Amino acid sequence: MALHIQSHGWHPGEIAVHSLLKVPTSRHENPTSAGLPPSYAHRVAVSPLVALGTIDEEGRPWTSIWGGERGFARPISKNILGLQSIVDQENDPVITALLGGKVPGEVVDAEVGEGKLMSGLSIDLETRDRVKLAGRMAVGVVNSLPPSKNGSTTSPVGQAQVAMHVEESLGNCPKYLNKKDIRPHIPSPRLAPSSPTLPADAQALIDKADMFFLSSTNGRTMDTNHRGGPPGFVRVVSNTEDSVVLVYPEYSGNQLYQTLGNLHLNPRVGMVIPDYETSDALYLTGETELLVGSAAAAFLPHTKVAVKVIVREFRFVKDGLSFRGSAGELSPYNPPARRLASECPASGQRQEVAPATATLVRKEILTPSIGRFTFKLHPERGRGLKAWKPGQHVTLDFSEELDQGYSHMRDDDPQSLNDDFVRTFTISNPPPQNINEVMDGTELQITVRRHGPATGLLWRHNIRAPLEIPVLGFGGEESFRIPIPTPDDNKQVAAVFVAGGVGITPLLAQALSVLPGGATPGQESNVEDHRETPLTLLWSLRAEDLPLALDTFQRIPGLAQLTHLFITGTTGPDSKRGDLRPEIQSIVGNVEEVGAKTALRRMLQSDLMLNVESSTRRKYYLCAGPELHKLVEDWLRQGEGIEVVSENFSY
C-alpha cells in the first residue's frame, strides 16, 4: 500500500499514476491508517477469506487465498493479526515463499519489522466488505495433517499458522464484488503437469472467472487487492509456447491507484484466480504494462484503462483451496464484459478522432420500445469518409451528451461509472448508390430498441433542438452480407435469415437488393439482372413489437411472402388468435394480408428447414439476442452441410 514518506502520504508511483490519469488525488491526504485500528480488526475477524501476498526469493510477488470460515483470522495483540488456515503446503506459492525450506512443524520467527513482506485483503463476499492490510510476517509455521486414510501417503494438505505485524490498513468500497456464500472445504490438491502454455482447464477457469486477487510491491511495502467484474472480464491475449499474456480492464474506483502506483515503480505482479465451485486455483506471476486511452482500446474496445500481464510462471492446482462458494448477486456496477479487439467484428474505419458528425433530423417511435432514427451526416472538411455497405454498423460517440465526469459511487446509475458512451448500431437503410464516399447531408437510419442511456437520449430528445453526435466510423463482417445473385451463378444457395426482435436490422439495408427484381432506392429494378434467390426470413418477435414487422413489410415489398413470423409474449404457450388483444389481432391480420405466415409460439428447431429444399445448400444468417442466438446455433450444429454466419449485439 502507500508509503507515508511523500507529500500527503503518497509514494512516487502513486503520484505518477495520478498525474498520468489526470486525477487530483495527490492533493489530499492518503486515507491509509497506521497499524490495525479496532474497527478494521473487527471487519477482518468476521470475514471468511483473506487473500495474502508475499515475495519469493527472486523478488516475484505471489498471491493466495486462505480461510473458509469466519474467525480464522483475528487480532491476537495490538497490530498483530493471527491467521490459522488449511493450506496446500506443497503448491501454494505464498506458503512456499513464507515458509519454504522448513520442515513441517518448524517455526519461522522474525524480529518486529524484520520479517518477510506481506500484504492481505480480508473479504466478505456475503456483505461485499473488504479491508486491505500491509506489513510483515512475525512468526509462521505449517503442520502436516494426518496421513490419508489408506496410510500409504502423506497428505499435501497442512495447517498454517501465521502472525502478521500489520503496519497499514485501509477499508475499501464494495464495487465490482459479486456476492458468494463461502463454506469451508478440505482440499485434495493436484498440480497440473508443467507446461509452457496454459492447459485447457486453466483457460476455461479464466473464461468464467468473475474475480481474481493480485499483489504488488513498491520495494518498501506490498499491496493485495481484488479485481472483479462480469464473468469473462479477464481475456487471454495469447497462449503459446513463446507468450502467455492476459489483459483485464481497470474499472472506475476510488482513484487512490495504490496497485497501479506500485506497478508503475515495479511492474511485477502475483495473481490468483479461484474457482469457487471446484476449489481449483490458477497462481501466476509476471510483469505488467499499464494501457491508457487508445492503447487500452486497442486491446479491449471501449476501455479507458487496462493492464496487460505477461505471465512468466504459473501453477494450476485442481482442488487446492480450503473453501468453496455458491454464486449470488452480481454487482450492479459490473459493466458488460469486453471482448478483445481480435475477437470483435471488424471495426472498419473506426477512428478515435471523429471523421463526421451525425445530426438527428427525424425520429419515428414504432413500438413502445423500438424506434427508427434518421440522421444527416456531415463529414469533416478535408477528411473523407467511405460509404457504408449494406448490413454494416455505425459507431457513434454520445460522451459529450452523457458523460457526467468522475464519481466514486453512483447507486442511481451504477453502470455509468465505466461507460465511455460509445455505441454501435446496425445501419437500417442502404447506402446511396454510385458513390464511394459519404456526401454532406447523406441520410443514415438506425432502428433500435430503447435500452440504456444512449437510446434513452434519442427517445427523449426534442427533435426541434439540434443534436449532433460524432461518428467514429463504419464496420461489420463482410461475411454477413447476403450475396446478390447473377444470371451466370449456377450455385443454388438458400439464404435463411434468422432474426430475433431488432436483429432484423442487418437485413433491412440488404433486402431490397437481394429480393427477386429488387433494387435499392435510386436504382431502377432490372429483373433480367437478377434470377430468383431462395431467401427465407424466420423472425421471432414479441407481440407488442408487431408494428415493426408491419412497417418492415410496407417498406420492403415482397419480403412478407418470404417470412415466417413467430409471435411471442402473448397469453401463453397455447395462445389462439381470439386470446390476443384486439389491436394485436388487427396487426396480425395485416401482416398476414401482405403474405407473412404467422405462429403464436416460439421458434422450434424444425422451423429452421421451412421452404428449403433438402437438396439445396443452405447458408444461415443469424442475428438475435443471446438466448435465441445460442439456441439456434446449437440446433444448426446438429445438421450437415449447413453454413452459419452470425452477428450479435455485443460489438
Image: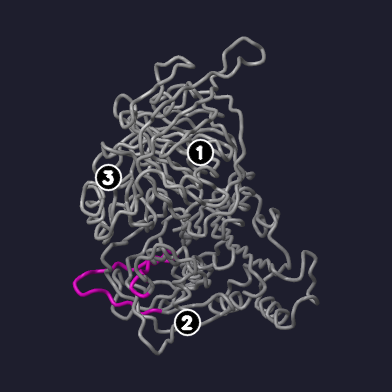
Q: Which of marks 3 and 1 is in front?
A: 1
Q: CB under 8 Å between callouts 3 and 1?
A: no
Q: How crowded is mark 2: few (under 14 residues within 10 Å), some or many (20 or more)?
A: few
Could you give the CA–CA distance between mark 2 and mark 1, rounded to whole angstroms? 54 Å
| Disc 2 residue type (three-letter) | Arg
Q: CB under 8 Å between callouts 2 and 3?
A: no
**Residue carrying label 1:** 74
| Disc 3 residue type (three-letter) | Leu
Callout 3 secondary element: loop
**Quadrant in the rendering for residue 357:** bottom left
Could you give the CA–CA distance between mark 2 and mark 3, rounded to whole angstroms? 49 Å
Q: Earlier in the sequence, mark 3 or mark 1?
A: 3
**Residue carrying label 2:** 460
Q: Does the magenta stretch include residue 68?
A: no
**Rendered location of residue 492, percent (x, y):** 55, 54
Q: Nearer the viewer, residue 631 or 49?
A: 49
Q: Which residue is drawn at 62% across and 67% down?
A: 562
Could you give the CA–CA distance between mark 3 and mark 1, rounded to whole angstroms? 25 Å
**Rendered location of residue 46, percent (x, y):** 55, 44
**Residue carrying label 3:** 3
Q: Is residue 382 magenta?
A: yes
Q: Which of marks 2 and 1 is in front?
A: 1
Q: Earlier in the sequence, mark 2 or mark 3?
A: 3
Q: Which of 361 and 469 is in front in this view?
A: 469
Q: Which of marks 2 and 3 is in front?
A: 3
Q: How many tags in the picture?
A: 3
Callout 1 secondary element: strand
Q: Residue at x 38, y 23 (%)?
A: 109
Instruction: Determine whether 411 is above or below 259 in the image.
Output: below
Which region is colored magenta? 375-401
Instruction: Determine whether 56 is above or below 444 in the image.
Output: above
